[in-house]
Amino acid sequence: MTRENHQSGELTSDEVPHHQSLLDCTDWASLGTARGDAKLLPAVLSRLLDPDPTVQIRAISELEPVCHQNSFYEATLSVSLYVASILAHPATAAVGPDRPTGPERGYPVRAALLDWLGSLAYDADDECLAIGERHFYGDYLADYAEMRAFRDHRPAFYRAVSPFLSDEHMAVREAAIVAALPLIEHPDLTRHRNELGLRVHRLLADSTNRYSRSRCLDALKNWGYDTTALESAADVAARTRHVRGGDWTGGYMDEPPF
């Protein structure tokens, strides 16, 4: 893979390069972020594989310049491909500090990375595209190459996420399912909807996470399912708060994903 390929968007849309290749072969200084060029990002990305999970979690928060204000930048695709490429790395199995997940304490770094990738996927989903198209009279992606590039590579991201849809750790499994939902909007991935739908039903039977539940319920509704029997009392209460103009999260999230 050449340096030029990493910059020009010529990566195969279903391919996730090796993380070290991305790190070494990308001309980071030539790519823009919300805070200038991306020349400092290789050091941040390297820390995602640090032996200390506290350092890893902090590094995820340092990726904010490539997703600032839910926007896409020149460096966003390369960073998101790097994140996808390390999901299976043993270092991401570490458990980070101070985040409760059900009866447990701590949060797997792998789940946090899936949360981050999923958040980007939702910022580029069909609903966001439709909103942009309305404001820009149908030419939104023509002038937004960075978002278009991310959407084109959804098959690559799904390939990286899908091995964790049945992960033994509930937090990782749940984060993977939620991240996969906007990815399978890609025309080449819609065939996975039935399989993912089964996983969504199991998640709704087991999970109490407000954010995960709202994303899953929204997906089923968009697919034409009646979700009444799947909604808990908390789901109904959250939806009511949202309709009445409640908290900034719409009543769905305890905290934003990484």
Image (cartoon, rainbow, N blue to C red):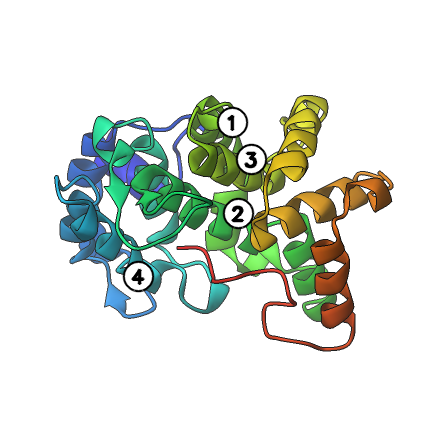
On the image, numbered disc 1 is attached to which residue?
165
Q: Amino acid at mark 1?
A: Leu
On the image, numbered disc 2 is attached to which residue?
121
Mark 2 surroundings: few (<14), some (14-19) or many (≥20) residues within 10 A: many
Q: Earlier in the sequence, mark 2 or mark 3?
A: 2
Q: Amino acid at mark 3?
A: Ile
Q: Earlier in the sequence, mark 1 or mark 4?
A: 4
Do the residues bearing badges 3 and 1 touch, measured as CB atoms within 8 Å? yes
Q: Residue furthest front?
A: 103
Mark in front: 2 vs 1: 1
Q: In what element is the residue under mark 1?
A: loop
Residue at 87% from the left image edge and 41% from the top image edge: 226
Q: Amino acid at mark 4?
A: Gly
CA gap, disc 4 and disc 2: 20 Å
Residue at 47% from the left image edge and 33% from the top image edge: 170
Q: Which mark is residue 32?
A: 4
Mark in front: 4 vs 3: 3
On the image, numbered disc 3 is attached to which residue?
177
Q: Residue 173: horizontal and vertical position, in percent?
A: 48, 32
Asked where in the image residue 49 lies, by quadrant, the reply is top left
User: In this orientation, does residue 185 appear?
Assistant: no
Q: Residue 11: horizontal and vertical position, in percent?
A: 39, 32
Q: Earlier in the sequence, mark 2 or mark 1?
A: 2
User: In this orientation, does residue 37 appear?
Assistant: yes
